[in-house]
């Protein structure tokens, strides 16, 4: 099993070479990719596994966490920390 991904450091700031708009767009693209991958897996699954994947793919597109992350990014927080 791969090592778990560690949490970004508290207070991590957006890199000066990346605009907030670019970081927010990247976050939205990543969320869409996760949604698409989970939906594709759900389409091939059955039973409880299908239900879990369908619920999880909906969470990936939930606009509230994306809006909250966008606000943090626009305030200078790194996209990794904001999400």
Image: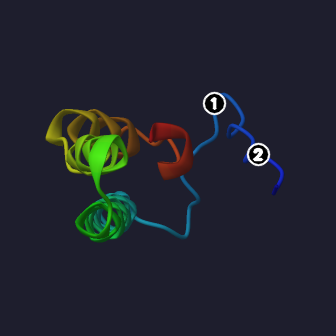
Residue 33 numbered mark, or none: none
The one of 7 and 11 positioned closer to us in this rendering: 7
Q: Is residue 81 left or right of residue 56?
A: right
Asked if residue 64 can be seen in this view, the reply is: yes
The one of 59 and 21 positioned closer to us in this rendering: 59
For this orientation, the residue located farthest to the front is: 47
Quadrant where the C terminus sits is: top left
To which residue does mark 1 refer? 11
Quadrant where the N terminus sits is: bottom right
Q: Is residue 15 left or right of residue 70?
A: right
Residue 14: x and y in percent read 54, 51
Residue 70: x and y in percent read 29, 44
Asked if residue 60 can be seen in this view, the reply is: no
Whether residue 50 is situated above or below residue 71 in the rendered picture: below
Q: Is residue 15 left or right of residue 31?
A: right
Q: Write the residue at 69% across / 37% down.
A: 7
Whether residue 50 is situated above or below residue 17 in the rendered picture: above
Q: Residues within 10 Å of mark 2 (few under 14, many from 20)?
A: few
When asked about the image quadrant of residue 12, the answer is top right
Q: Residues within 10 Å of mark 1 (few under 14, many from 20)?
A: few
Residue 41: x and y in percent read 35, 66
To which residue does mark 2 refer? 4
């Amino acid at each position: 099993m791969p090592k778990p991904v560690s949490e970004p450091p508290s207070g991590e700031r957006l890199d000066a070479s990346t605009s907030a708009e670019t970081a927010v767009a990247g976050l939205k693209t990543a969320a869409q990719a996760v949604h698409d991958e989970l939906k594709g897996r759900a389409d091939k699954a059955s039973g409880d596994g299908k239900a879990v994947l369908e619920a999880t793919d909906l969470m990936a597109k939930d606009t509230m966490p994306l809006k909250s992350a966008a606000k943090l990014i626009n305030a200078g927080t790194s996209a990794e920390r904001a999400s």
